[in-house]
Amino acid sequence: MAARSVRRATAAIATGALALATAACTNPGAGTTGTGGPKDSAVVGIAYEPDTLSPLLGYGKDGNSKIFDGLLAFDADMKLKPALAVKLPHISDGGLTYTYTLRTDVTFSDGAPFTAKDVVFTYRTILDPKTNNPSRTELDALKSVEAVGDDTVVFHLKYPYAPFAERTVHAIAPEHVAGKQDVNTGAFTTKPIGTGPYVLTDWSKGEKLSFKANPKYWNGAPVVKKFTMAIIKDDDVRATRLRAGDLDGAILPPNLAAGFRDDKGKRTYAAKTYDYRTVTLPTHHPVTGDTAVRRALDVAVDRQTMVDKILEGAGKPAYGPVPTDSPWFAKGTERRHDLAGARKILDEAGWKPGPDGVRVKNGVRASFPLWYLSGDKLRQDHALAYASDARKAGIEIKTQAGTWEVIEPRMKTDAVLAGGGSPGDPDFDQYLLLKSTLAGDGFNNMAWYDNKTVDRALDDGRRTNDPAERKAAYDTIQRELVKNPGYTFLTHIDHLYVVNDAWTSDAKGAPLTTQVEPHDHGLAAGPWWNVEAWQPKKTGDTKK
């Protein structure tokens, strides 16, 4: 589960419906391909904005930041490729040393040269306890980092951490700017300088992020010279403005994306994701902490109906953080909808139906609250469906909406309809979600899950490079989640984007593409994950 700043940034996801006032961004699409103007600018509608634009505080940790680059980057197939490094790292010393050779032709947008010292500065600052970076735990394996001249960086690890190379897609900050400011509050957090394809020109909070192309970008100046992300938190408003021509593209929930199905001027893109919705079952609550209740809820829930009715087919049932189509998924851990089985589990555990149908054990009613984020229609729908399924088994769930400020202090004892998911490596999401030592650490391990077998498997999975050993470790974790769920995973959600069919992904006219996406989406994901490579469609091209 992502930590505080990341979670709050992603809380108002595209499937939520928040206050209309935040959608007031006056005609940001004027002059774009969507309105027939010059074909060198694009405006897209997103549903949330980040808390910060500083890599030192967590921005750009998964790549695709537009303002910054990492040493490595993910291509369209999520395979690592060189970025600020000239090649993939040299791994030595039994997986404890990673050596990167850097490009020597890169400058920051202010003209200063990029060197190894900027890499060292970035990682050392993140690891500094004084830095308010909620993602520091992700670099737990890193012992030290050093520069060897201007073009070589060497990372030394505490233990062989299998996915460390994926961690070096992290955005790199300039020491000569950020190093002279307060890392947590300095101007760099809202007025960043990077090496990326775009330069931030304006950030109107709650309204838009505006960028211009970096003409000196080391990988070639983008054809799209102006790029705007309009922050429109309301789904309906986002769809309306896309239809009106204010936007070139937008992320939309399934029901609204369907409205553009017959629009020959637009194309819908469905991105596969690791994005899940889950219910936390805190160990510190007398009902949700009971293993029998957890197991009963796990089979009482009708996941497929949620996919069909709530997601309109744009997703799949979730049985854990790993999607069923991932090679890391443990076959045989699927849980079928079995209401009779749920009732039997509760009966055998001593939870007997009370006069109102709600079960009781030792004077405790099988009742608990379930919080979801205010304005998030998707979470609300999942919460209501989950409560309805639970009631059929004799468990009363009282759904309540609130802001994260209201929800966070209650997470130790109250259930939450949460979201998460991170591709790249199974360690990325499962460690933060399930490790017992991270219970109570912001939005990590929100259920306070405590399973020693899982703890050992999490450590085993990240400390070996052997694929078979890693697969065995993560299979163990998924099987343990069947025995003692800790969370009720509901669905994995496809992300849907509708974009004007005026753009191609390259000069040859190929359609735009999407990557496999994490829970965080809309800002650096979607078809605009590589907007710097977009080309305007040539006159006469037809929708493919």
Image: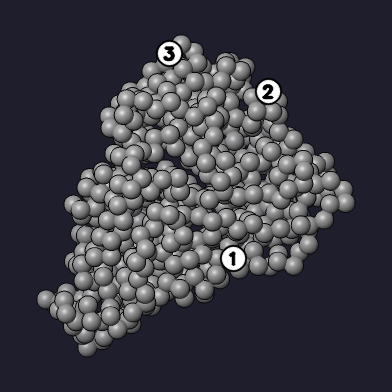
In the figure, is residue 144 to the left or right of 36?
left
User: At label 2, which amino acid type do we have?
Assistant: Lys
Q: Nearer the viewer, residue 325 or 394?
A: 325
One can see residue 280 in this view: no
In the figure, is residue 175 to the left or right of 288?
right
User: At label 3, which amino acid type do we have?
Assistant: Val
Q: Nearer the viewer, residue 23 or 522?
A: 522
Q: Which residue is mark 1?
A: 254
In three-dimensional space, the C-alpha distance between marks 1 and 2, rounded to whole angstroms, equals: 39 Å
Q: Which mark's residue is nearer the viewer, 1 or 3?
A: 3
In the figure, is residue 261 to the left or right of 98?
right
Q: Which mark, residue 523?
A: none
Q: Is residue 320 above or below residue 209?
A: below
Mark 3: secondary structure: loop
In the figure, is residue 495 to the left or right of 487?
right
Q: Which mark, residue 216?
A: 2
Q: Are marks 1 and 2 in contact (CB under 8 Å)?
A: no
Quarter containing the C terminus? bottom right
* Residue at left offset 28%, top offset 50%: 473
* Residue at left offset 63%, top offset 65%: 256
In three-dimensional space, the C-alpha distance between marks 2 and 3, rounded to whole angstroms, equals: 26 Å
Position in image of residue 324 (x %, y %):
43, 61
Q: Is residue 158 above or below residue 472?
A: above
Position in image of residue 475 (x %, y %):
31, 56
One can see residue 270 in this view: yes
Q: Which residue is mark 3?
A: 148
